[in-house]
Image: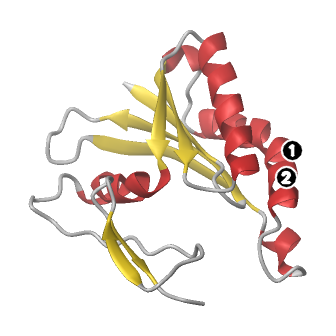
Amino acid sequence: MRIIGIETSCDETSAAVVEETGDAAKPWTIRSNVIASQVQIHREWGGVVPELASRQHIRDICGVVERALGDADTRWSDLGAVAVTQGPGLIGSLLVGVAFAKAAAAAASLPIVAVHHLAGHIESLVLENGEIPLPAVVLVATMRRVRRTTRWRSCWAWDIQADR
């Protein structure tokens, strides 16, 4: 099965096509991975401006997804599902990706898979390394506003937080 994944949680619009390999040791292969960065847009502001990010996602998403499908030599009819980041992230940016993914999945009669952004980072380790021996500890460090606490997250990641 091939799956297209769409990610718009912050300031990069990305899409990738992955395919099952049939190999239990390394079950997925990456057929394409396309990223449209917004670094230049936000640089002058000293950080990501959510409204600018959302508007740029709207401009970029069609081209990014089309290129990901093209680079993977894949048509919509070749896909088995559409995966999309559903959060956490900037709400306006997430809405662009989720709305696009829902519309594309409906138009292609494909199931949609909502992906937790941080869990996606953890699962991406499997793409590069195959199955991870369990039990395992994985640290996901984010740049969001934080406080001095360590707490357990439902996605099997420790969210370590510090004051600004």
Q: SS for tag 1?
A: helix
Left or right: 20, with 148 as reference point:
left
The disc labelled 1 sits on which kind of residue?
Answer: Arg
Quarter of the figure with residue 64: top right
The residue where tag 2 is placed is: 56
Quadrant of the rendering where the C terminus is positioned: bottom right
The disc labelled 2 sits on which kind of residue?
Answer: Gln
Q: In the depicted view, which residue is nearer to us: 135 or 29?
A: 135
- Residue 99 screen position, x and y as percent: 70, 30
The residue where tag 1 is placed is: 59
Residue 110 is labelled as none
Mark 1 neighbour density, 10 Å: few (under 14) some (14–19) many (20 or more): few
Q: In the depicted view, which residue is nearer to us: 101 or 94?
A: 94
Quarter of the figure with residue 35: bottom right
For the point 34% across and 78% down, the residue is 150
Quarter of the figure with residue 122: bottom left
- Residue 105 screen position, x and y as percent: 59, 19
Q: In the depicted view, which residue is nearer to us: 104 or 136?
A: 136
- Residue 42 screen position, x and y as percent: 84, 72
In the displayed structure, would residue 159 be above or below residue 135? Answer: below
For the point 14% across and 47% down, the residue is 25
For the point 88% across and 79% down, the residue is 45
Q: SS for tag 2?
A: helix
- Residue 44 screen position, x and y as percent: 90, 81
Left or right: 85, with 137 as reference point:
right
Furthest residue in direction bottom, as rendered? 164
